């Protein structure tokens, strides 16, 4: 049995190693399109700060790891898939035949439609090559403009601030991390960043970028004109599905999969940022591009590819962000449910102490939460959401004091086991 895995990020690596443990004699080929060993994009911020070298980003440290695992690494880009002939055509001209195929091609950064976005001093921060360029252009005191303050943008922002640059961030939404945090939490993160010396513009977007004689100039929708030595575009990512055109593999926003992570084509699976899988909270298929989900999906896909039966109960949105020392998190259906559908909430906000907690209920179950400056409740929040525990009288207690989450978790767990 020959397993071909397209994509050598965390999902691809976990899948390959899971197959090897489950099917010791099978052939495994892991395809990646960058001329470096498999690495973690989540480690790039540590490379930017100088905390690690490039080898510190590698997912597996041993030089002989892949040979010892008998996993063949191929450096090329997947250009097309023929599901009838069960083969993958690569950019190096190679045609890889497969018995089982995993699409773990991840996502790619999206460039906003702004005049000048393709100028030489405008960069994404997505690959090791991007990181090398940014390091070379951000000495202490350099003026850096970052477009986007989402989850990825805030991680990059912290690394840039630690490099000692003069940083300005522009976010089109009305708050920072608008697709991860409530307005209350996002507003506090903005205030925290400004206290740390970062200039932040919200409800604004770059309308044009130009080279102004040795530096860059950006005109914003709010009328502000900003000058910078470097501009970083952190305006979102999209699943890498372009090469699947004509393959017959069903896609919408990402690759559509069932609970076993199999696509509509037998023997073809998808996992990680490229998959559009069942969401635990909503029951709808969605792209949930976070590493814990990628790891879980990769294991499920790999077990099925190797002949074992495994299913996913759905991906749970979980985001934890450290912004210059301020830790924030969101879980599940953090945006809540309409009151007409049983939606309700409890909120605690202490702006002076940068503490925030909002719990989202549907009837008497916790379905989502957002926390800032509070880390001790993370396990209880996740447990209550994933077990769909009925809170009963504890809902009223949590509405009066949202910090009593651990008590609520222990009480509902005890009731369930009685």
Image (cartoon, rainbow, N blue to C red):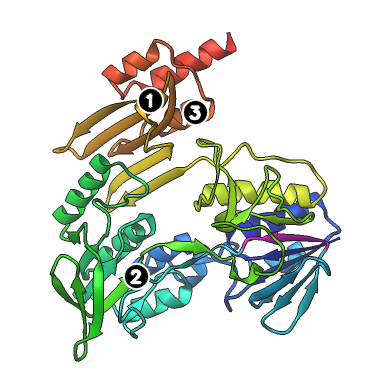
Vertically, is 169 above or below 326? below
Q: Is residue 135 magenta?
A: no
| Percent coordinates x, y for residue 376 in the rendering | 36, 32
Q: Name which residue lies at 24% across and 72% down.
A: 207
The residue wearing badge 3 is: 383
| Percent coordinates x, y for residue 333 in the rendering | 43, 36
Indicate the quadrant containing the N terminus: top left, top right, bottom left or bottom right: bottom right
Front of the two marks 1 and 3:
1
> On the image, which quarter does residue 99 sit in?
bottom right
Mark 1 → mark 3, Cα distance in angstroms? 26 Å
Left or right of 277 on screen, residue 347 = left
Q: Main secondary structure of the magenta part?
A: strand
Which mark, by number, is residue 233?
2
Asked whether disc 3 touches disc 2, contact meaning CB atoms under 8 Å apart, the reply is: no
Left or right of 384 on screen, residue 302 = right
Q: Nearer the viewer, residue 124 or 138?
A: 124
Q: Earlier in the sequence, mark 3 or mark 2?
A: 2
Segment colored magenta? 99-104
Q: Name which residue lies at 78% across and 65% down.
A: 83
Residue 372 appears in view? yes
Which mark, by number, is residue 53?
none
The residue wearing badge 1 is: 340
Vertically, is 211 above or below 14? below
- SS category of the residue bearing label 2: strand
| Percent coordinates x, y for residue 410 in the rendering | 46, 17
Q: Residue furthest front?
A: 340
Mark 1 residue crowding within 10 angstroms, few (<14) / some (14–19) / many (20+) = few
Indicate the quadrant containing the C terminus: top left, top right, bottom left or bottom right: top right
> On the image, which quarter does residue 345 sit in?
top left
- SS category of the residue bearing label 1: helix
């Amino acid at each position: 049995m020959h397993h071909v895995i397209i994509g050598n990020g965390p999902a691809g690596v976990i899948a390959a190693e899971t197959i090897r443990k489950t099917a010791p004699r099978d052939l495994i080929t892991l395809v990646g399109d960058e001329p470096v060993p498999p690495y973690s994009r989540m480690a790039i911020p540590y490379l930017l700060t100088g905390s690690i070298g490039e080898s510190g980003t590698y997912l597996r440290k041993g030089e002989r790891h892949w040979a010892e695992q008998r996993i063949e690494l191929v450096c090329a880009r997947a250009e097309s898939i023929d599901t009838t002939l069960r083969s993958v055509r690569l950019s190096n001209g190679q045609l890889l035949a497969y018995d089982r195929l995993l699409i773990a091609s991840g996502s790619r950064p999206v460039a906003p439609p702004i005049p000048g976005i393709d100028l030489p001093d405008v960069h994404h921060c997505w690959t090791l090559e991007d990181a090398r360029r940014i390091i070379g252009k951000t000495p202490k005191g350099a003026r850096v403009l970052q477009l986007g303050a989402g989850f990825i943008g805030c991680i990059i922002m912290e690394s840039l601030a630690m490099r000692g640059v003069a940083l300005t961030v522009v976010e089109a939404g009305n708050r920072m991390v608008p697709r991860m945090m409530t307005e209350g939490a996002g507003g506090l993160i903005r205030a925290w960043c400004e206290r740390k010396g970062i200039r932040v513009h919200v409800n604004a977007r770059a309308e044009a970028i130009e080279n102004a004689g040795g530096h860059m100039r950006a005109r914003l929708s709010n009328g502000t004109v900003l000058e910078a030595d470097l501009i970083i575009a952190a305006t979102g990512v999209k699943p890498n599905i372009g090469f699947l055109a004509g393959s017959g593999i069903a896609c919408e926003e990402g690759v559509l999969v069932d609970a076993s992570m199999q696509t509509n084509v037998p023997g073809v699976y998808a996992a990680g940022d490229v998959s559009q899988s069942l969401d635990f909270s909503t029951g709808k298929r969605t792209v949930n591009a976070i590493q814990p989900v990628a790891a879980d999906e990769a294991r499920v896909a790999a077990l099925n590819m190797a002949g074992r039966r495994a299913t996913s109960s759905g991906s749970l949105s979980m985001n934890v962000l450290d912004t210059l020392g301020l830790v924030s998190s969101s879980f599940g259906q953090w945006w809540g449910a309409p009151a007409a559908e049983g939606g309700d909430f409890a909120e605690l906000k202490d702006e002076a102490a940068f503490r925030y907690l909002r719990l989202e209920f549907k009837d008497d179950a916790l379905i989502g939460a957002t926390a800032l400056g509070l880390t001790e409740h993370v396990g209880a929040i996740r447990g209550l959401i994933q077990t769909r525990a009925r809170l009963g009288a504890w809902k009223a207690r949590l509405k009066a004091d949202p910090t009593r989450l651990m008590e609520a978790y222990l009480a509902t767990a005890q009731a369930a086991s009685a």
